Amino acid sequence: MKTINIGGVPEHFNLAWYLGLKNGEYKDVGINLRWKDYFGGTGAMCKGLRDGDIDMAVILTEGIIKDIIAGNKSKIVQIFVETPLIWGIHVAEKSKYKEIKDLKGTKAAISRYGSGSHLMAYINAQNNDWDIEKDLDFEVIKNLDGAIEGLTDGKADYFMWEKFTTKPLVDNGTFRRVDNCPSPWPCFVIAVREDFLKSNREDVKTILNIVNETTVEFKNIPSIDRMIANRYEQELEDVQEWLSLTEWSQENLSRETVENVQNQLLALNIIPEKYKFEDLIEKL
């Protein structure tokens, strides 16, 4: 049996992977798929791909495109979640900041440089006509637990993270959400290390086929809303709203989308140059 390592955030988006693993669907075809939770998000997964700790990652679109251009020898093989990620913009519950305009020039908590929370701070600044040179400042906090500590202690002023993941922290009075900032592209893609893909192409195809069968039917799984609510400690009504807003995909990124992502990252000086479509995307 071939062992293949895959990483992703321990969030509701990735339940389809857990279900396939729980049901033994990968082992049935001779693949020992080993899932690794990355609490540090996309930046940590990029490092995992570069270091060979994982062979595949379910990762934010903008983050992996930036890191491939920065030298990560990986390729995007498929969109996983088609719809945008809705980033909540959070402050500590007792923060003096009440509106998005109050955060101009303050310090954003980010999991690490190159992470989704870092890149989306630029998108949010652009959306609000801030000066990205003068109005952005960062404090690295590693993960969600670090953000709780950082915002509560005043090391940073605001933190951007997926709105439904952080909703329990808003409900219990740890954070206050001042606004939302949807990503302007499909949020999660599946990336694979190039050297691994060259020698394991058929196995990667098999893995994608299995998870795609799950995501196609995901919303029709009996009591899926209750399963998500229980597993991820979320309110049932929040899960139902999230399900209504979320669409999975079994296709790869289009040339138009890749161009759009790169144009925005280039305009914000997040990437130094644009790559050819074929240097980022692998069609299986």
Image (cartoon, helix red, strand yellow):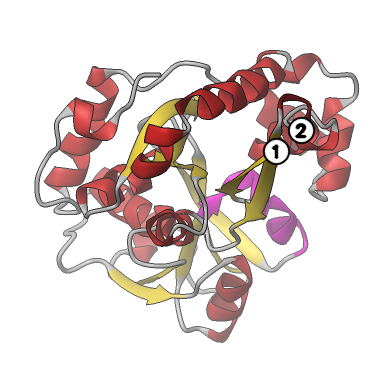
Q: How many marks?
A: 2
Horizontal side, residue 154 vs residue 255: left or right: right
Magenta-colored span: 161-172
* Residue 218: image location, x then y, percent: 73, 20
Q: Position of residue 54 (x, y in %)?
A: 52, 52
> Is 207 in front, or is 95?
207
Say whether residue 13 is left or right of residue 90: right
Viewer-proximal residue among 110 and 4:
4
Question: Which residue is identified by label 1?
Answer: 1
Q: Residue at x 56, y 85 (%)?
A: 153
**x, y percent for residue 69:** 21, 47
Identify the secondary structure beneath mark 1: loop
Query: What predominant SS class does the magenta segment belong to?
Result: helix
Q: Is residue 169 magenta?
A: yes
> Considering depth in this image, is 120 or 130 the residue closer to the camera?
120
Is residue 36 placed above or below 158 in the rendered structure?
Answer: above
Q: Nearer the viewer, mark 1 or mark 2?
A: 1
Contact (Cβ within 8 Å) of mark 1 with mark 2: yes
Residue type at mark 1: give it: Met
Q: Quadrant of the N terminus?
A: top right
Q: Which residue is rendered at x = 56% and y = 71% of the image?
A: 147
**Quarter-wise, where is residue 185 in the image?**
top left
Query: What numbered label is drawn on residue 27?
Result: 2
Q: Who's the residue at 52% across and 17% down the image?
A: 250
Occupied quadrant, residue 199: top left
Does the rendering let one see residue 128? no
Q: Amino acid at mark 2?
A: Lys
Say above or below: 96 vs 217: below
Could you say which is closer to the camera, residue 4 or residue 276?
4
Q: Residues within 10 Å of mark 2 (few under 14, many from 20)?
A: some
